[in-house]
Image (cartoon, rainbow, N blue to C red):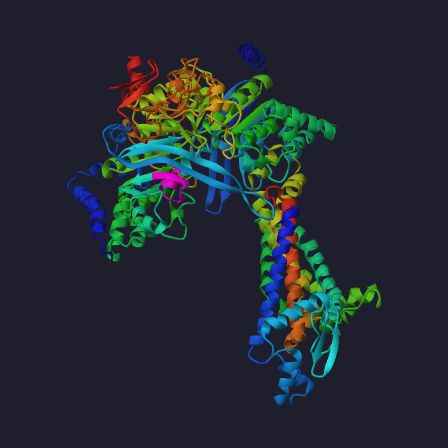
Amino acid sequence: MTSVPMTQSSASERTSSEGPFLEVEDLTVTFPTEDGPVTAVSGLTYSVERGKTLGIVGESGSGKSVSSMAVMGLHDAKSAKISGSIRVGGTEVVGLGESRMRALRGNSMAMIFQDALAALHPFYKIGKQLEEAYLVHHSSASKRDARRKAIEMLDRVGIPQPDRRVDDYPHQFSGGMRQRAMIAMGLINDPSLLIADEPTTALDVTVQAQILDLLQDLQREFNSAVIIITHDLGVIAEMADDVLVMYAGRCVEYGTAKQILVAPEMPYTWGLLSSVPDVTASTDARLIPIPGNPPSLLRPPSGCSFHPRCLHSDKVRGDLCRTELPALLPASTGTAHLKRCHLADPVGVYQNEVLPEIAPDLVEETR
Amino acid sequence: MTQDPNAEAQIEPTEVGANAAESGERQLDSDVSDAYGSHERGVDGLDFSSLADLGHTASELDPDAPAVLTVDNLKMYFPVKSSGLVRRTIGHVQAVDGISFEVPQGGSIGLVGESGCGKSTTGRLITRLYKPTGGSMMFEGHDLAKLSNREMKPLRRDVQMIFQDPYTSLNPRHTVGTIVGAPLEVHNIVPKNKVLPRVQELLEVVGLNPEHYNRYPNEFSGGQRQRIGIARALTLNPKMLVADEPVSALDVSIQAQVVNLLQDIQREFDVAFLFIAHDLAIVRHFCPEIAVMYLGKIVEIGDRETIYGRPHHPYTQALLSAVPDVKQAAIGGRRERIRLEGDVPSPINPPSGCRFRTRCQFAQEICAKVEPPLLQIGKRHKVACHFAGELGAHPATPVTTELLGVDDQGSTVPGATPTNTQLTIPGYEKTWYDLGTKQTTGV
Amino acid sequence: MFAYVVKRLISGVLVVTLVSMAIFLLFWYGPSSPAQPICDRETSNRCGNKIELYEKTLGYDNPVYEEYGKYVKGVFVGRTLTIASNDYECSAPCLGVSYRTKQPVKEELVKRIPATFSVAIGGAFLYLLFGVPIGVAAARRRGSITDKALVSSFLFISSIPYYLFALLTWLYLTITFEIPLFSETGYFSPIKDGPWAWFSGLFLAWVALGIFGCTQYTRFTRGAMVEALSEDYIRTAKSKGLPTRTIVYKHGLRAALVPVVTIFGIDFGTLLAGTIFTERIFEIQGIGWWSLQAVQGRDLPVVQATALFSAVVLIISNLLVDIVYSVLDPRVRLS
């Protein structure tokens, strides 16, 4: 644990020359349905370097899981139309043949899921499921090697008595241990990219903390690029280097965790911040919900898809919010910070209107 | 139609409420429902500052409110049967093991803790979905723990429950009108032709379109379904609502809508809440008083400022330090945390003495030998720990020895008389045991 | 596990006892005297007041519990039965003597078991052999034209009443098209008459059972498979980079088999207990055929024996299903 800062800095030095491990460009995912096409993700662009963590925030239906599953190639080619570009370690995976995709999946990129009880096969022993993940990418390895590797990984993720627990079934593990086993399975082939889809949502806070610690330790050890999908802004704040806020399939704000959570410039991000109470916030802070419900992707709203729920569209000239989709443009805090909003002075609105309501204590500090 | 004169009195408040709506007093509510109720109506004409005014700050504590429910030494043991030819009871899951607390009238108390700590079981005991193994639950002069199901029926009106999952807790084959109106018919308290107007009134209160009474649950979104569940719970004008994880199945942007709605309801109808949730931030916002449970016991209980600001129990401290904090974004990285190792032990064979000791960094011999009493150490603060103290200032020697008549290792001191302090009473005493002076003090 | 099996067997014995009691009561409290059918038969329908003689020798004038006691005793140690003035030796386990043939019921039952079991095993083998793979294939192509065509045509076949279906099969294959293989149906001993006679005699019954069962098992398998393939663990398997075959068979089918096996266990038990329609239509003299005859001829001891036999077979097959279930699904512990 004491060597952490060193490995971290050396990791970023190493990666800076290589460029991002994952580059997603103009990704669009459409599902044809009986009622018409549903565009679950549209025009999404982001990148993640090795050793870095990208947090993707959004509500259900925002496209956060769909886009990550597209990266993993988990969508059925018959039911999903994917366009744009996804480069994993330099390899373009959009349109890649199934067998080559399979060689990447679980090997150089892996995914862990929310509900580990459902995501692990109930009929096979934990060890067998880990071994299977190892053997499929190590055709020359023997079963004994695979078992040794499985035990080693269970040990690495902090499962006590791994040589015995390896023969347990998933239902014999506690919730936290199952998620650990899931992580062990994801990391068994030392992937360069790990996608964690709501990895701690179903878990208790102390177990969540254990799992997040583990993910962070493992990221340092394996120097992998990590995408963490969550709706918990606290998790984002503590885990992510960069944050991507998604709404109705689009990126609405993108920047470093600090930019997004301290100086957000998009009303939806404000809404997320104001609708979640914080354990340390002032008790004078108001809980201000985002009105309405997430939009239907079948008939997305015109213009900015957030406009029917936006409380600041009256500050925009004319009907712009309703008629024109705002472009993803640099925000005032820096070029790396992008936002999709027509508001002319978002910083002013946030500082003078939003912040006093949701964090009165912070306003006093800044003044 | 019932002949019970109380029944008429029961529906009285809402009649008043309905009239008040006309006179503008309840205008606030319909604004709220317009604002975050129906998607179709959108938010035209509403600006941020007016919505912000409708958003609530954290609920405040009324220290003088009388208790509406007094839970004393409540126990629920579920038998564990052996396998084999004859199924003998070989043990008990001590889901709830002797907890005491009070719910103030029109106020709310939060129960927090991790899965398996017994918080949901407590909720189910109070609504009498289970019959307790022991203890009492005094509500309006009745002990809910002792009543038979038949005797319980008239009281069920007064204690209603809001469930976690809005997808499975509503019967998909019944219309919203039937679901919300069913309690009225079960308890037979309004004439048939009055059921529909009452249902529509309730739908309006929870921010749904009253014209939608004949729709089915699947036509609503998760947040709207939870509103239906809330309307159903409100149908009989309960005095108390048990909300078991009422928002955890909802999207983040919807959670705040429902929390604000529950606060509106509490203020308007003066309903007491037992609010059960694992989300510490939501509980902090909703409940001015919080009880922290671990393995079937309350380990710390007190007002919000104390529990979140100066927790004295190592478990509360660990729990709070584990919550990821949005504010950390300004600093970057993860904040310092107390790491709890391992999992919660089995409630069938809980550890002796203090149940938290197996995972506690301060545990000493005494913790295994003597169970720490839930000791009042402040005006509205009780903690069950031999080494109770603020984070970083836990005492080196147990603070409870004099009270319990034991030495620092937990062995009984011959001749010592344990001070019989108010160790199990549900509410708070005017005097308490001061940890600094080791003396009983008062205001 | 062992304790569980013992417990289930004990409760099984209890059920069989209750079934036997219930049937016995029916004898006594039926609309006509239980001795009536045999009296009619023996006296060429001129029974009249001879009925009392029959009732007396058969013991129907005694209290029901006394006779039930004798019956139970007979099961364990054998007994001598008297019908009118003739004595019939019935060795343990005695299930009575047929009123029609005057043969001990047990011997006839044992003689008929091979026919019924041959029909059941052959038919079940065929419908599993085709039903499960077709179901898997349909589930994998869910929503496609092949899937839709398969599902609707199979639904059509299974909505025909089975007896009609079996009758049509027999009519077309044997009478209309005169396919030689199907010309002579019935049960022939594979040892005495040779395996070919056995095979060709049963083949048409197997085909009828097989096709009909196949349409049902295709639908069961397809449903279970569609459900299994939409589970989270399939997505996990895919994300591990496993080949499609492994995902579908090792992860999907393995889980889908559990409900299919459960239904099969109960179905197969019913088949073993005697398939009345199949045996009647294809002239196979198995237990189903026999029990049908017994009901028509009011041959009460045979009715009783066949009912008890079905009860025993169903209890055993249910127990086997539960044991297999616990082997297939580690989450189910038998206790």
User: Looking at this rendering, what residue extends furthest in the left direction?
Assistant: B23
The image shows residue B159, relative to residue B408, as above or below, that is: below
Quarter residue B387 falls in: top left
Quarter residue B191 falls in: bottom left
The image shows residue C55, relative to residue C93, as above or below, that is: below
Q: Position of residue C322 (x, y in %)?
A: 62, 50
Q: Position of residue B69 (x, y in %)?
A: 30, 37
* Quarter occupied by the N terminus of chain A: top right
In this view, the residue in front, B324 or A265, is B324
In this view, the residue in front, A314 or C159, is C159
Q: Position of residue A310 (x, y in %)?
A: 32, 31
State which region is magenta: B122-136
The image shows residue A13, relative to residue B302, as above or below, that is: above
In this view, the residue in front, C274 or C47, is C47
- Would you say residue C214 is visible in this rendering? no
- Would you say residue A76 is visible in this rendering? yes
In this view, the residue in front, A232 or B39, is A232
Q: Residue at x 59, y 17 (%)?
A: A221
User: Is B412 part of what is drawn in magenta?
Assistant: no
Left or right, residue A142 beside residue B124: right
Q: Residue at x 84, y 65 (%)?
A: C191
Q: Position of residue C312 (x, y in %)?
A: 66, 61
Quarter residue A87 falls in: top right
The image shows residue C229, relative to residue C79, as above or below, that is: above
Left or right, residue B243 beside residue C160: left
